[in-house]
Amino acid sequence: MQAMRSWVQLTVTAIAAIAFVYVTAAIFNLYIPRTGVAMKPLPAHPLETLKDFSTCAVTLWKDKLGQISLAVTTLFWGAGATLQFIVIDWSRVALGYDLSKASILQGVCALGIAAGAVAASVRVRLDRSVKVIPLGIAMGLIVIVMDMVRSVYLAVPLIILIGGLAGFFVVPMNALLQHRGHHLVGAGRSIAVQNFNENSSILVMIALYSLLLGLGISIYTVIVIFGVFVAGTMALVQLWYWRNRRVHPEEIERLLAFARAEDPHPPR
């Protein structure tokens, strides 16, 4: 009974903390200045809405910078969600942790992501966002190092490093995607397309992860597969961008110059 009462108190405290964060965020939103941009009316018929959404998705995927940033964020959120489950299963096998202790490691990863995001916000200009793609490759390769870790004293800095790399490379790419989406289809529609792609990626990657575990494959082998997949797909995106620069150099330079002109941060 005492354990149940403690669990209820912990749950109530956690919910209260989350509610406080949401209320604080809502207050900050009240001070965001209005842009004065006219809202585009949404179609009234569901089929017309679907057609409008499809057009927006195709438009973003055809843009030479939008497609790169959309591919990176789509892959990242699918990989990030899968990594949360990997950390739980890996910490149980490698460190002997139960679910509650494994959740602490997930929080450590979140701290790394936050630190990386803050660093990226002050170090990476909008027109240089694509230069962080190699960090996604590095993150995938570093994840494989988890297979060699059996101590929490090594696990914590490793997970912080993985989170830091993730935060540092996804924030600039997300900013670039919002920049292109705002000018191509509008901010709201851009976010809708982004969320659809990212959640689809999450569903597919978690399903594949569950399938691998269901086939009896060791978590250590799954980590190697996951790391190689992340590094490999990010490398393909990098090659994709290089091809765009080679085939469409004038368009890429024009889009980067446009991003540079709209970036509020001074050049470094």
Image: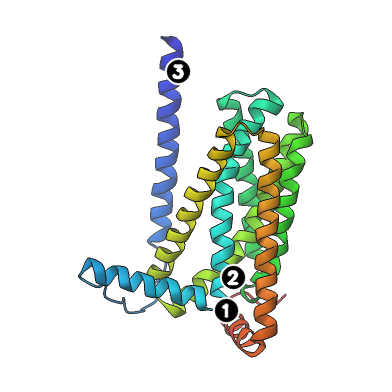
Q: Nearer the viewer, residue 130 or 53?
A: 53
Give the image location of residue 82, x and y in percent.
57, 44
Give the secondary structure at mark 2: helix
Give the secondary structure at mark 1: loop
Of the residues shown, which amino acid type is indicated by label 1?
A: Lys
Q: Decide which of tag 3 and tag 2 comes sooner along the chain.
A: 3
- What residue is rendered at 43% in x and 69% in y? 190
Q: Nearer the viewer, mark 1 or mark 3?
A: 1
- Residue carrying label 3: 6
Q: Is residue 196 above or below residue 208?
A: below
Q: Is residue 230 above or below residue 184?
A: above
Left or right of 1: which side holds 251?
A: right
- Residue carrying label 1: 64
Of the residues shown, which amino acid type is indicated by label 2?
A: Ile
User: CA gap, disc 1 to disc 3?
Assistant: 54 Å
Numbered label attached to residue 68: 2
- What residue is rendered at 48% in x and 74% in y? 60
Give the image location of residue 114, x and y in percent.
61, 50
- Looking at the rendered image, the quarter that the C terminus falls into is bottom right
Whether residue 119 can be seen here: no
Q: Residue furthest front?
A: 215
Q: Residues within 10 Å of mark 3 (few under 14, many from 20)?
A: few
Give the secondary structure at mark 3: helix
Give the image location of residue 168, x and y in percent.
66, 58
Whether residue 244 can be seen here: yes
Q: Decide which of tag 1 and tag 3 comes sooner along the chain.
A: 3
Of the residues shown, which amino acid type is indicated by label 3?
A: Ser
Q: Residues within 10 Å of mark 1 (few under 14, many from 20)?
A: some
Give the image location of residue 264, x and y in percent.
58, 76
Q: Residues within 10 Å of mark 2 (few under 14, many from 20)?
A: many
User: CA gap, disc 1 to disc 2?
Assistant: 7 Å
